[in-house]
Image (tube, grey):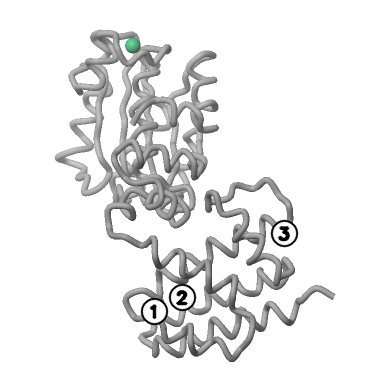
């Protein structure tokens, strides 16, 4: 990934302020987007040694190649105290050899077991003067409160849909597929990429849009519920698409500048939103979540489909515009 996408993120600006004004000892970057998180950790490491993040000098290159002696990398996933963490902490105690600082990166820090986290805590709290530790985590819940409270917490923003489309098309995905993937992923580049590689869902996305634009009467429900989009294999994705579209329709109704995930669908969104008030959409979104819950319990898919479509129509009419 090129640096520009990372550089745009508010999280990067927050970290980079410290690069300029004085690096701290302990940082925790949070994101559910594995690709963005990995890239951010990578460029953050570069910035610790080359504040211009030029990516070209000998320092940047040796960090990127993994041969810089003052950079240590580890992963929390499957980390063992004796085999992995103790040798790492021993190295931390040794002064840097090439630069004036040492950097430790721990990816998937929230997957570290409790024993490792407790063992790490002392160093994380009071590292040697020359030390900067950077943890990457997908969520806060996997980290001990003691670890969480000792590091400077930085949260990555979602990636804009246009940026996701650009990233995916650069790698050869067609624009239409990239737009569906961007909508589905709701700002998560890693998820969008996996989705785009996983199959062709353009038709399903179109059909969900059409359904939400056209469905106005309960007599139409059976006809939609019996379609392939509500089959056992497809229903979960149909619900995800409905969620994204209705959420964007809500943003349109409320005229907020909150990030939208569908791209180039102003006309369709306006048509979807036309039948709803914001309260109605909120209730429809609850119906979608209810349907997701029901699907976990091996219930009849056709019943779930009818239920959610009825629920959405009801939401539409219960809160209709007066
Ligand atoms: Zn450089």
- Where is mark 2, residue-wise? 292
Q: Quadrant of the N terminus?
A: top left
What count of labels does the image hold? 3
Whether the residue carrying mark 1 lies under 8 Å from ligand 1 is answered with no
Whether the residue carrying mark 2 lies under 8 Å from ligand 1 is answered with no
Q: In which quarter of the image is the C terminus?
A: bottom right
On the image, the x and y values in percent for residue 257 come to 68, 45
Ligand 1 visible in quadrant: top left
Neighbour tally class for label 2: few under 14, some 14-19, many 20 plus, Cα within 10 Å: some
- Where is mark 1, residue-wise? 296
**Residue 143 visible (yes or no):** no
On the image, the x and y values in percent for residue 105 come to 31, 31
Could you say whether the residue bearing mark 1 is in a helix, strand or loop?
loop
Q: Which comes before the other along the chain, label 3 or label 1? A: 3
Tell me whether the residue at label 1 lies in contact with that at label 2, contact meaning CB atoms closer than 8 angstroms: yes
On the image, the x and y values in percent for residue 235 come to 40, 76
In the rendered view, would you say 90 is above or below 108?
above
Could you say whether the residue bearing mark 3 is in a helix, strand or loop?
helix
- Residue 191 left/right relative to 163: left
Tag of residue 253? 3
Residue drawn at x 74%, y 69% is 277
Could you say whether the residue bearing mark 2 is in a helix, strand or loop?
helix
């Amino acid at each position: 990934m090129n640096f520009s996408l990372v550089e745009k993120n508010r999280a990067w600006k927050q970290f980079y302020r410290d690069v300029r004004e004085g690096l701290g000892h302990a940082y925790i970057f949070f994101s559910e987007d594995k690709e963005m998180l990995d890239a951010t950790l990578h460029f953050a490491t570069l910035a610790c040694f080359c504040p211009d993040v030029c990516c070209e000098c000998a320092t940047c290159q040796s960090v990127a190649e993994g041969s810089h002696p003052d950079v240590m990398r580890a992963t929390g996933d499957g980390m063992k105290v004796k085999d992995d963490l103790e040798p790492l902490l021993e190295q931390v105690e040794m002064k840097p050899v090439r630069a004036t600082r040492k950097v430790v990166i721990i990816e998937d820090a929230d997957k570290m077991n409790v024993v490792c986290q407790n063992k790490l805590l002392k160093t994380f709290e009071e590292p040697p003067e020359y030390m900067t530790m950077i943890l990457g985590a997908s969520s806060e819940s996997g980290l001990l409160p003691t670890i969480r409270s000792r590091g400077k917490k930085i949260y990555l923003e979602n990636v804009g849909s246009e940026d996701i489309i650009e990233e995916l098309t650069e790698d050869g995905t067609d624009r239409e597929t990239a737009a569906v993937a961007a909508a589905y992923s709701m700002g998560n580049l890693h998820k969008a990429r996996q989705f785009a590689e996983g199959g062709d869902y353009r038709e399903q996305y179109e059909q969900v849009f059409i359904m939400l634009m056209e469905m106005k009467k309960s007599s139409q429900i059976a006809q939609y519920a019996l379609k392939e989009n509500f089959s056992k294999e497809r229903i979960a994705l149909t619900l995800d698409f409905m969620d994204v579209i209705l959420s964007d329709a809500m943003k349109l109704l409320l005229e907020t500048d909150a990030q939208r995930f569908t791209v180039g669908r102003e006309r369709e969104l306006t048509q979807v939103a036309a039948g709803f008030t914001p309260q109605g959409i909120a209730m429809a979104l609850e119906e979608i979540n209810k349907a997701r819950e029901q699907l976990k319990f091996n219930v009849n898919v056709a019943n779930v489909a009818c239920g959610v479509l009825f629920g959405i129509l009801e939401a539409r009419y219960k809160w209709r515009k007066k």
